[in-house]
């Protein structure tokens, strides 16, 4: 069918569960956006938690947004 489907879920603050009812087992990939307060700033971080059949870096990387768009800073 050559079909792509996106499922968007919101995590409760402080939770470690990506989906409320455990439906994350259905998806091929989980991309996690995290907000962290650092002093007076709130910074965004990006991580690939799960991506079937793909080797990827584990960890959280800064996600920068400016006039040029989005950029992930991978170290």
Image (cartoon, rainbow, N blue to C red):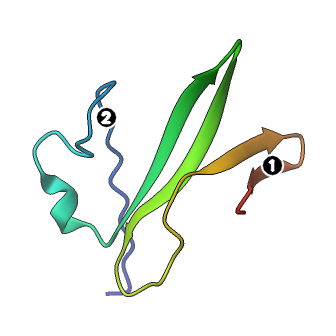
Q: Quadrant of the C terminus?
A: bottom right
Name which quarter of the figure residue 39 lies in: top right
CA neighbours of label 1 inside 10 A, class few (<14), some (14 to 19), many (20+): few
Which residue does the image show at 59% across and 43% down from the upper left? 45
Which residue does the image show at 27% across and 46% down from the upper left? 18
Which residue is situated farthest in the left direction here?
21
* Mark in front: 1 vs 2: 2
Instruction: Report x, y in % for residue 37.
Output: 59, 21
The residue tagged 2 is: 11
Q: Is residue 42 above or below residue 69?
A: above
Instruction: Report x, y in % for residue 15.
Output: 26, 32
CB under 8 Å between discs 1 and 2: no
**Foreground: 39 or 46?**
39
Which residue is situated farthest in the top direction here?
40
The disc placed on residue 69 is: 1
Element at label 1:
strand
Give the side of residue 24 with respect to residue 68, left or right: left
């Amino acid at each position: 069918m050559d079909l792509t489907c996106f499922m968007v879920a919101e995590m409760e603050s402080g939770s470690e569960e990506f989906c409320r009812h455990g439906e994350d087992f259905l998806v091929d990939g989980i991309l996690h956006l995290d907000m962290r307060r650092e002093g007076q700033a709130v910074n965004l971080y990006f991580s690939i938690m799960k991506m079937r059949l793909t080797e990827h870096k584990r960890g959280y990387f800064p996600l920068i947004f400016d006039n040029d768009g989005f950029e992930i800073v991978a170290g």
